[in-house]
Amino acid sequence: MFIVLLYPTSSERLSLLTCREIKSIHSELSALLSVLSILKQQTDDNKSSAKHLLVLEVPLEECNHVIKEIQIQLKPKRSLLGRAFHRSRWPLLEGQLSAILLKIERYKSLFGLAISAEQHYLSTGIEVLARNTDMKVRDLLDRVQVEFTAAEQERNRKIESGLAKSRARILKWVYRTPFDERHLEISGRRQLDTGTLLTLKPEFQSWVKENPDFKILWGNGIPGAGKTFLRSRVIDYLTNNITSRLPANIGVAFLYFDYKGRAEQSPPLILCSLIHQLASQLSLIPAPLESLYNDLSQKNKSLSSEPTPAYKLLLEILKMFKRVYFVFDALDECEEETQRRNLIPMFHGLASSGASVFITSRSYPLDINESFSASTGAVSITLAAQEEDLRIYIEQKINGNTHARRLISPTIKDNIIQKLVDCAKGMFLLVHFFIEDICKRTTVNEIKRSLQDLDSTLAEEDSLLGIYQRVMDDIKNEHESRRKLALKSLSWAVKAITPLSVHEFCQAVSIKEHLQDIGPGDTPDISMILERHSGRFVL
C-alpha cells in the first residue's frame, strides 16, 4: 500500500490566497450592492425632492448589473474539477476584474459627487428653511406682541375710561355748576396787561413766594376800582406763572362772589366748589372723597348737606398739595349774617392749615375790616386802578373801535388819555364809562365837547353821577320804542332778584300791560338790547 503525501505547491498557496481575496471582494460587492439598492430606493421614493440623485438612476442600474455579473464570476466552485478549472482561468479573470473594479470605482466617484451635491442642496435648503422658519417665528412673535400690546392698551383704555367716568360722576356729585365761567368771561374783557403792577407789589410777592411771610392778603378798594379785573389777573398769574415756576403739585382755587347769586353761594356750596376745583387738579380722586361719596350717595345725600364732613374733607385734600392758593373776590357782596359769619372763620382756618388766601372787598364793611386787620396776622393792600393800567386800557379800547380809531388823532388820543386818568382818581369803572361814551361820538367836535365836560376836580360820587346822567341822557335821546326797550332792560338788569337767562330776560322786557301771552314775535333779539346798552351790558 502506498501512501502519497501531497503538499501544496507555491502556485497552489497563491491560488488559495487569491480565493480568500475573491471572497472578500465578493463580500464587499454584496455590501456595495445593498447600499446601491438603498440609494436607488431612496431615489425612487423621493424623485420630487432628491433632484441631484435623479441623474444616478441609469448609472445605478448599470452598476447594479455589473456587480451582479462579477459576483457570479467570483462565486467559488465547490467541485475539485471546478476549482482546478477556476484556478486555471484566474490570470484571465484577474485582468477582467481590474477593469470591472476600476469601472465600479468610477461609479462610486459619480455616486459620491451626486450625494455630495444632494447633501449641499439639502443643507442649503435646510438653512433657507431655518431662516424662513425663524422669520416666520419672529413675525408670529411680532404679531403676538402687537396683538398683546393692543389688548393691553384696550384693557388700560377701558380701565381709564371706567376711572374717568367714575371720576366725572364723583366730581359732578360734589359740585355741578362750572366754576370758571365767570373767570373766563372777566379775563376775556380784561385788557392784556391790566393788573401787572399789582403782581409786582412787595406785599403780593411776599404772599406768593414759596415760603410766604404771611398767609392772608386782603386787597381792598373803593367801588369801581376794578378789583374784579385785578383779581382775575391774580388768578391768571397764579395758574400760569406760579404753578410752572414753583415745584410741582401746586393747587389754585377761586370764587367770584355776587350779591345776585347769594342763593348759589351759601357756605356749604362754596366748600363743595373748592373741593371740586382742587380734586380736579389731582390725577386720582382722593380716597377720602371717594369714601365719603360712597357713604353719602347710598343715602341719597349731597355733599353740601353735610358741611362739617365737607370742611374736614377740604382740609384733607389740602395735605395732598405742596402749596394751595385760594382767591376770593368781592367778599362784601356776601350777606353778613348768613354768609360772611361762616366764611370768614373758614378763610382763617384754611390759612391756619397752610393755604395762602387772597381776598378782595370794599374797605368799609366793619366785620371784614376787623377780621383782616393787622392784629389777625393778615396783610392789607390797597387796590386801585393804576395810571399805567388806565392808559393801556384807554388806548386799547380806542384802537379796538374802528370808528373811533379813524376819528381820533394821536394828539386827541393823548388828550383823552390824560383827561380820563386825571378824573378817574383810581376808579376803573369811571374810565370805562367815559371811554365807552367817547367811542360812540360820531364827529371829532363831539369828542372834543365831551372832553370839555370832564372835570377832574369833581368829587368821586359826583363823577359817577355825571356818568350815569350821561347814560340816561343817551337813552332818552333814542327813538321811543328803543328808549322804552333800553329803560325796561336796564330796570330788569338792576332789580331782578335772581340771575336771568337770555331767554328769560328777553321775555321779561317784553311784558306789557294787558298782554296775556308773549309769543316769538313779541320778544326782541338780545343783540338789539346789547346794542342799546353798548358797553353797559355784558352777555
Image (tube, grey):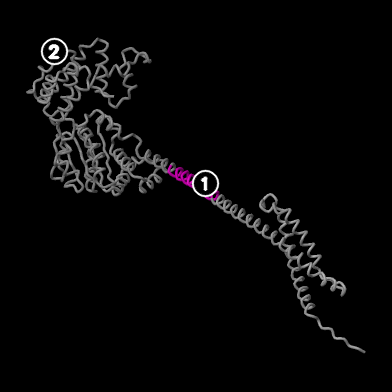
**Up-down relation of residue 399 to residue 202 (above or below):** above
Res. 89 in view? yes
Q: Nearer the viewer, residue 431 or 127?
A: 127
Measured as percent of width and height from the top left, residue 247 is found at 26, 47
Q: Which image quarter: residue 408?
A: top left
Q: Residues within 10 Å of mark 1 (few under 14, many from 20)?
A: few
Q: In the rendered structure, which amino acid carries the disc numbered 2?
A: Asn
Q: Which image quarter: residue 402?
A: top left
Residue furthest out toward the top: 480
Q: Residues within 10 Å of mark 2 (few under 14, many from 20)?
A: few
Q: Which residue is mark 2?
A: 445
Could you tell me which quadrant the N terminus lies in? bottom right
Q: In the rendered structure, which amino acid carries the disc numbered 1?
A: Arg
Measured as percent of width and height from the top left, residue 28 is found at 73, 67
**Of the numbered discs in the image, which one, if any, rests on residue 496?**
none
Q: Look at the numbered disc 1 and give the secondary structure of its residue.
A: helix
**Up-down relation of residue 414 to residue 323 (above or below):** above
Q: Which residue is mark 1?
A: 143
Residue furthest out toward the left: 457
Could you tell me which quadrant the C terminus lies in? top left
Measured as percent of width and height from the top left, residue 419 is found at 10, 22
Q: Nearer the viewer, residue 392 or 4?
A: 4
User: Which residue does the image show at 31% across and 13% down from the upper left?
Assistant: 513
**Residue 107 part of the magenta-drawn span:** no
Mark nearer the N terminus (2 vs 1) = 1
Q: Which residues are magenta?
A: 135-160
Q: Main secondary structure of the magenta part?
A: helix
**Residue 148 part of the magenta-drawn span:** yes
Res. 335 in view? no
Spatial CA distance of label 2 from label 1 is: 80 Å
Task: Tell me: 102 left or right of 147.
Answer: right
User: Which residue does the image show at 18% across and 30% down from the upper left?
Assistant: 226
